[in-house]
Image: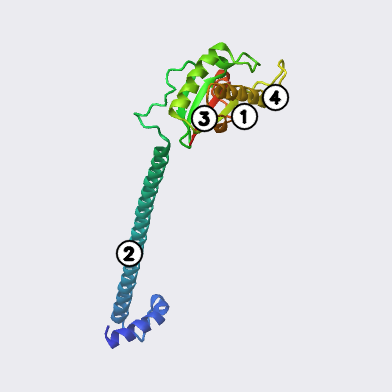
Amino acid sequence: MTTRTTKAALLGVLCAGTLIAGGCKSVKKSDYNAAIEENTKLRERVATLQDKVRQSNEQVDAAERSKQDALSQQQAMYQSQLDTARSQQAQSQYVTPVNQVSGFEGIPGVATSVGGGGEIVVAVEGDVLFDSGRVDLKSSARQSLDRVASVIQSKYPGQKIRIEGYTDSDPIRKSKWRSNEHLSAERALAVEQYLVKKGVSNDSVYSAAFGPANSKSTKKDSRRVEIVILGS
């Protein structure tokens, strides 16, 4: 901008009101118009640059958000993979190999599974073992327990064994037992004593009573004794 034009622009700003009313006699109208035009262009340029700065800031913010989103997604993916790997690792510790046979297969009233700590759980149906409210073993129960004792002696000699007694959740009303816990304790002990009688080491087996705890989907399945082979 020339010196003359700059001065004219300043004078034009001061005399704008006067010129509109009747004109500023100290500044030529052409200089005033030139100053106004240049001022308008400068304001437009400032506005344009401000808009470009705003757009640039928005682009930077969008890029930063996109970067953060990408990092978050990557982190979530790695965490999911880690959780899956840990779960698979935990499960692999407790799954019985496909070719491993527990030895209890095919015994009437007996179901075998692998527990959370890798122990073998031999569940014998309560209705196979006992009549309702009783702790005396049925003859059919003796036949199944004979085979269980034989497998324990042949495949798991010397391993610790816990006999767990369970009942359903129905309260005791007609029998002499004070609670389901007492009933489950006597039933577990009856199974323990029978296995010991059949040759299982008395030093490696003990009983535990759980009553209605850890119930199954049905009352029938809840009434059971579990022979848990813990390990040597």
Q: Are marks 4 and 1 in contact (CB under 8 Å)?
A: no
| Of callouts 3 and 1, the N-terminal one | 1
Q: Residue at x 29, y 81 (%)?
A: 31
- Secondary structure under badge 1? strand
Q: Classify residue 171 as left or right of residue 14.
A: right
Residue 215 place in picture, x, y as percent: 57, 26
Q: Which residue is mark 1?
A: 210
Q: Residue at x 48, y 19 (%)?
A: 147
Q: Nearer the viewer, mark 2 or mark 3?
A: 3
Q: Alpha-carbon neighbours of circle 3 within 10 Å: few (<14), some, or many (≥20)? A: many
Q: Amino acid at mark 1?
A: Phe
Work out which quarter of the rendered image holds the N terminus and state it: bottom left
Q: Amino acid at mark 2?
A: Ser
Q: Amino acid at mark 3?
A: Val
Residue 9 place in picture, x, y as percent: 34, 82
Q: Which residue is mark 2?
A: 56
Residue 67 place in picture, x, y as percent: 34, 57
Q: Is residue 159 visible?
A: yes
Q: Which residue is mark 3?
A: 228
Q: How far apart in space, not on screen, are marks 1 and 2 (Cα)?
A: 70 Å
| Of callouts 4 and 3, the N-terminal one | 4
Q: How far apart in space, not on screen, are marks 4 and 2 (Cα)?
A: 77 Å
Q: Is residue 222 visible?
A: no
| Of callouts 4 and 1, the N-terminal one | 4
Foreground pick, 46 / 207? 207
Q: Which residue is mark 4?
A: 179
Foreground pick, 59 / 38? 59
Q: Amino acid at mark 4?
A: Ser
Q: Nearer the viewer, mark 4 or mark 3?
A: 3
